[in-house]
Image (tube, grey):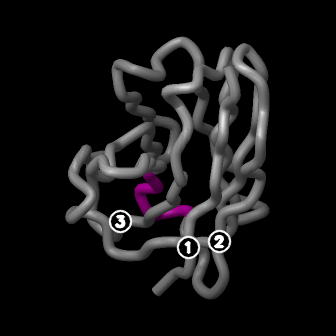
Amino acid sequence: QVQPVESGGGLVQAGGSLRLSCAASGRTFSSYVIGWFRQAPGKEREFVAGIRWSSTLYADSVKGRFTISRDNARNTVFLQMNSLKPEDTAVYYCAARGRAGITYGANEYDYWGQGTQVTVSS
């Protein structure tokens, strides 16, 4: 079992950058699929990016702007977010999946962090 903990959220102007971190406590999660999701007020939680070993997957809305990476020695996954837009405003969640394959569905992930707020002002 792993327990993801997110950090790095905040307030940024449109066009700016933020880097989110997802650190795991407990068992190493180097073998887990890690996904980033986000949820804006009144909207459903949506997939942003995922990583399994060196394979990555991105939502179309963030391709070319966001980069997911992992540092297994530090049990940490990062989400570098560049060229941020007001529509990126949401609570961002990190989730871990114990089965193979990066998937878009939130219900396919087993362990969730508490979320970190990202607000992009126009």
Residue sitting nearer the eye, 111 or 44: 44
Q: Is residue 33 left or right of residue 4?
A: left
Query: Residue type at mark 1?
Result: Gln
Q: Is residue 115 left or right of residue 83?
A: left
Q: Secondary structure at mark 3?
A: strand
Q: Is residue 64 left or right of residue 52?
A: right
Q: Residue at x 35, y 65 (%)?
A: 97
Magenta stretch: residue 50 in it? no
Q: Are marks 1 and 2 in contact (CB under 8 Å)?
A: yes
| Disc 2 residue crowd, few under 14, some 14–19, many 20+, Cα 10 Å | some
Residue sitting nearer the eye, 6 or 110: 6
Q: Earlier in the sequence, mark 3 or mark 1?
A: 3
Magenta stretch: residue 32 in it? yes
In the picture of the structure, the residue carrying the numbered disc 2 is: 5
Q: Residue at x 27, y 50 (%)?
A: 44
x, y (%) of residue 94? 52, 59
Q: Earlier in the sequence, mark 2 or mark 3?
A: 2
Query: Label 2 vs label 3: CA separation?
Result: 15 Å
Q: Secondary structure at mark 2?
A: strand
x, y (%) of residue 118? 65, 45
In the picture of the structure, the residue carrying the numbered disc 1 is: 114
Q: Is residue 105 above or below residue 89?
A: below
Query: Residue type at mark 3?
Result: Arg
Q: Quadrant of the C terminus?
A: top right
Segment tinted magenta in the rendering = 30-35
| Disc 3 residue crowd, few under 14, some 14–19, many 20+, Cα 10 Å | many
Q: Residue at x 44, y 33 (%)?
A: 56
In the picture of the structure, the residue carrying the numbered disc 3 is: 97
User: Which of label 2 and label 3 is nearer to you?
Assistant: 2
Residue sitting nearer the eye, 62 or 25: 62
